[in-house]
């Protein structure tokens, strides 16, 4: 498919080159037709501005010096037109080649993404079948296994389940439909308020007070930034124990002339070491029960923020709370 497209692209480039050459030839002919007008214009200028005889004398009986100047002036015009069109034709041809290369890269990237997604699904299906087969083997023949055999089969099952979780995380991250952000003026305070109402209806048993700073407006992709705020709110809820009255705050401030957004909670918090791996989708939470089990939310938020040309980081104090900060590039 790619080879056929490349052949098609070469044909388009050749056609564009022929068209540019044809256009240059036509404009060159127009330049030749403009030579008489340049003669007339120069004659009028000599007669009117410089007072060198009448217009009729300049047109029908010019001196050899004036005639030579007009010929050189016409040649100069003709050469300028030709060089200009030659430059424009080469620029158009290079632009066509660049557009074709970008299109080929987009197709290649699409093929690689489809292959990657298909490979992840196949690996996950194979791993699930392996784990299911081992579990059936344990159920049917477990009473015949000795202690060492049971230990190894349980190890295979645990490894298979871990692989399934990792493949599921990879699919969840790669399946997000992210393209170029479609920026518009978005009222982030209203967007955050709508998200809080949605969360309150989904989790009526949680006692959480949301505090939204008013008058937060910014240029961003509405759908993408909504996903970021939703994931950050859900992550904050995961850090807040059910026995504690939760407080989640969303606001902004200026730092060094740049707008910084934040989501703060009064949950269990985290240390500086935990903050470094907080956005890692494949972090291991088995040895840290305080960290949220869902690792995709913050990884997804980081990907969206990076897509906007921004940065994201976390600061927290154990048993006090944590804050997620993020910025994004505002178009000039």
Image: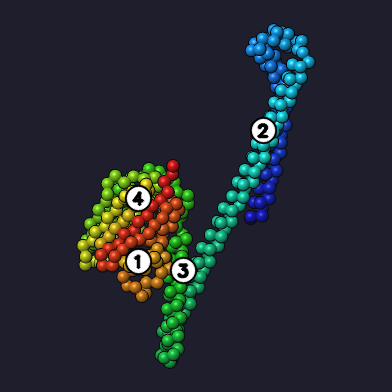
Relative horizontal placement of residue 76, taking residue 299 as reference (left or right): right
Q: Nearer the viewer, mark 2 or mark 4?
A: 4
Question: Which of the two discs, 3 and 4, labels the residue nearer the N terminus?
Answer: 3
Question: Which of the two discs, 1 and 3, labels the residue nearer the N terminus?
Answer: 3
- How far across and how far down the image is residue 145, in percent? 44, 90
- How far across and how far down the image is residue 316, in percent? 31, 63
CA distance for labels 3 and 4: 39 Å
Relative horizontal placement of residue 203, taking residue 16 as reference (left or right): left
Q: Which residue is mark 4?
A: 255
- The answer, for residue 194, to whether it is visible in the render is no
Q: Point out the image quarter for the C terminus.
A: top left
Question: Which of the two discs, 2 and 4, labels the residue nearer the N terminus?
Answer: 2
Assess whether mark 2 and mark 3 are in contact (beta carbons under 8 angstroms). Answer: no
Using the image, tell me which numbered label, if any, was put on residue 168. Answer: none
Q: Which residue is mark 2?
A: 84
Using the image, tell me which numbered label, if any, was put on residue 167. Answer: 3
Front position in the image: 120 or 182: 182
The residue depicted at 46 percent of the width and 55 percent of the height is: 177
Q: Which residue is mark 1?
A: 272
């Amino acid at each position: 498919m790619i080879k056929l497209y490349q052949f098609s692209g070469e044909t388009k480039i050749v056609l564009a080159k022929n068209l540019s050459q044809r256009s240059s030839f036509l404009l060159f002919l127009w330049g030749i037709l403009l030579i008489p007008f340049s003669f007339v214009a120069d004659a009028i200028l000599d007669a009117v501005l410089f007072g060198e005889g009448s217009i009729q004398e300049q047109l029908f009986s010019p001196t050899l010096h004036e005639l030579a100047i007009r010929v050189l002036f016409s040649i100069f015009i003709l050469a300028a037109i030709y060089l200009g069109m030659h430059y424009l034709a080469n620029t158009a041809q290079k632009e066509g080649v660049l557009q074709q290369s970008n299109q080929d890269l987009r197709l290649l990237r699409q093929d690689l993404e489809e292959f990657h997604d298909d490979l992840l699904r196949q690996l996950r299906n194979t791993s699930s079948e392996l784990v299911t087969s081992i579990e059936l083997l344990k159920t049917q023949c477990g009473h015949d296994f000795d202690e060492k055999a049971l230990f190894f089969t349980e190890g295979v099952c645990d490894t298979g389940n871990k692989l399934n979780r990792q493949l599921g995380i990879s699919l969840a991250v790669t399946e997000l439909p992210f393209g170029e952000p479609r920026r518009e003026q978005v009222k982030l305070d209203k967007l955050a308020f709508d998200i809080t109402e949605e969360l309150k209806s989904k989790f009526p048993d949680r006692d959480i007070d949301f505090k939204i700073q008013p008058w937060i407006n910014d240029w961003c992709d509405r759908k993408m930034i909504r996903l970021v705020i939703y994931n950050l709110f859900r992550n904050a809820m995961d850090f807040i124990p059910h026995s504690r009255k939760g407080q989640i705050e969303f606001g902004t401030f200026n730092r060094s002339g740049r707008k910084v957004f934040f989501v703060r909670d009064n949950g269990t918090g985290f240390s500086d070491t935990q903050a470094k791996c907080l956005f890692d989708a494949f972090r291991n939470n088995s040895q840290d029960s305080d960290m949220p089990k869902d690792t995709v939310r913050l990884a997804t938020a980081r990907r969206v923020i990076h897509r906007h040309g921004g940065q994201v980081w976390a600061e927290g104090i154990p048993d006090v709370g944590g804050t997620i900060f993020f910025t994004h590039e505002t178009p000039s």
